[in-house]
């Protein structure tokens, strides 16, 4: 019994220490995010490259997923609405569910699967190869040069791609709506605008930024936990991706609580 | 040139030297490898881009000029794993020379240039970038002295 309590206590302490160190790291990054000196020529180059890798290279896959998913969601939702005679709730469904819930969630999944794992591996490999040591020797600040551009890119890419996802799904919704209900473009846009709430949009923007922040910050931190051995790379990536998944769930739950209280 | 009989003494002296000259240190060592996800020109340009906020295009032109000076234009777009030992050494040397008023430290250069019998190549390359460097210090083991041609002072 005492052993079980001991193990439980140790796990709890480890978890709290991990959260504390992540929070401290996050605070350091946030301070640098607002520092003008952070954005020198080298950091800007990293940011541009990262934005290209995250937001541009992914576009063909992203557009395909958004189109397929948008068609499925719209097709099913509109049919149900028609069967139940709930046409009045069409706008609420699209703005309250697709734009604020589905789009950020699908976007964060795609970015996490692609970019978070890449960042985690990249930082772990740099640690193993002693390339982080190179930066230290040449007085190049890791946070300014490596971390801030990746995290800022994560936040901006999340907002950009989530907006794009919403627009594609809503555009498909227009076609489906006109096919099923015979809705005109004006009526469709009017319905969406009437259902849009400023608070929802603010919350969804914060949610996207929080997703972007944590799905890049956590892989960086876990990558830094790699040792000098090659075998530590897959362990660092595995731990990082599990924690990214947990962070996504926590942010999703917290944003839902904020929206519905 | 500073020669040591064992690794412990070398490391102790080297760490002290690094700490004393941190702001102007241009370090060429296996302990400071090239960054593998950057092209060679980016590795060289990085120092000026970061410390002097030099625009990317200007820093690239400078890196290309220096590579041309060493006859290494072919490695401009390459990455670290694709380099020969001589090419890697030159890239590391140029990166170190990008530090303003660089105090260049060559840490056991034959650890990088594993296929060379003597230090002629090193001295030749150093002469070509002499104008970029304020001081040169070579840290190595005493039994490597013969490979440098018996020279006690690299600056000579």
Image: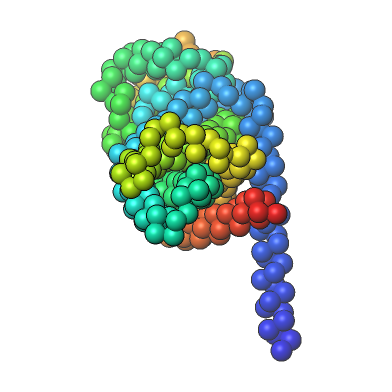
Q: Residue at x 63, y 37 (%)?
A: A198
Between residue B135 and residue A224, name the one nearer to us: A224
Q: Where residue B140 sits in the image (x, y, percent)?
A: 48, 36
Position of residue A189 relative to residue A210, above or below, is: above
Q: Give the residue displayed 72% in from the left and 81% down from the top.
A: A5
Q: Residue at x 48, y 30 (%)?
A: A47
In-front residue for pair A94/B94: A94
A72 vs A206, left or right, is left
Q: Is residue B84 left or right of residue B136?
A: left
Give the number of marks: 0
Q: Nearer the viewer, residue B35 or A96?
A: A96
- Extreme residue in the bottom direction: A1
Task: Tell me if B124 is positioned left or right of A238 in this view.
Answer: left
Q: Is residue B149 visible?
A: no
How did the renderer colour the structure?
Answer: rainbow
* Picture quarter with the C terminus of chain A: bottom right
Q: In this picture, is A156 found above or below A225?
A: above
- Residue A168 appears at what percent x and percent y? 38, 39
Residue B107 at what x, y percent from top left? 49, 35
Percent of width and height locating residue A104: 50, 46
Question: Of residues A42 and A85, which is closer to you in this image?
Answer: A85
Most distant residue in the left direction: B74
The image quadrant that residue A17 belongs to is: bottom right
Q: Image point 43% across, 31% down: which residue?
A: A186
Residue B70 at least partly seen: yes
Quadrant housing the N terminus of chain A: bottom right
């Amino acid at each position: 019994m005492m052993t079980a309590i001991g193990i439980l206590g140790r796990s709890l302490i480890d978890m709290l220490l991990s959260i504390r160190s992540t929070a401290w790291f996050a605070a350091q990054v946030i301070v640098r995010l607002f520092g003008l000196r952070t954005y020198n020529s080298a950091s800007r180059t990293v940011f541009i490259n990262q934005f290209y890798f995250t937001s541009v290279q992914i576009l063909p896959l992203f557009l395909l997923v958004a189109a397929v998913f948008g068609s499925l969601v719209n097709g099913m939702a509109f049919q149900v609405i028609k069967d139940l005679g709930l046409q009045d709730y069409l706008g609420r469904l699209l703005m309250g569910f697709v734009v604020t819930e589905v789009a950020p969630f699908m976007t964060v999944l795609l970015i996490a699967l692609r970019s978070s794992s890449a960042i985690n591996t990249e930082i772990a490999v740099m640690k193993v190869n002693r390339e982080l040591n190179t930066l230290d020797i040449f007085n190049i600040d890791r946070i300014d040069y490596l971390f801030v551009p990746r995290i800022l890119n994560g936040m901006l890419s999340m907002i950009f791609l989530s907006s794009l996802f919403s627009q594609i799904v809503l555009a498909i919704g227009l076609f489906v709506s006109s096919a099923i209900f015979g809705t005109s473009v004006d009526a469709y846009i009017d319905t969406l605008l009437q259902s849009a709430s400023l608070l929802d949009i603010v919350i969804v923007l914060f949610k996207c930024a929080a997703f972007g922040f944590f799905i890049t910050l956590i892989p960086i931190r876990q990558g830094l936990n790699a040792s000098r051995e090659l075998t530590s790379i897959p362990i660092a990536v595995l731990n990082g991706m599990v924690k990214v998944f947990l962070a996504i769930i926590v942010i999703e739950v917290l944003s839902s609580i904020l929206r519905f209280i | 040139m500073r020669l040591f009989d064992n690794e412990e003494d070398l490391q102790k002296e080297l760490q002290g030297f690094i700490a004393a000259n941190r702001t102007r240190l241009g370090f060429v060592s296996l302990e400071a490898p090239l960054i593998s996800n950057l092209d060679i020109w980016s590795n060289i340009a990085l120092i000026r881009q970061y410390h002097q906020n030099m625009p990317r295009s200007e820093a690239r032109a400078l890196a290309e000029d220096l590579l041309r000076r060493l006859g290494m234009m072919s490695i401009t777009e390459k990455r670290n794993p694709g380099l020969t030992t001589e090419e890697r050494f030159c890239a590391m040397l140029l990166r170190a020379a990008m530090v303003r008023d660089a105090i260049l430290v060559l840490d056991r250069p034959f650890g990088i240039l594993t296929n060379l019998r003597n230090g002629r190549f090193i001295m030749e390359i150093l002469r070509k970038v002499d104008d970029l460097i304020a001081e040169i210090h070579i840290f190595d083991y005493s039994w490597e002295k013969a490979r440098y041609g018996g020279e006690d002072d690299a600056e000579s």
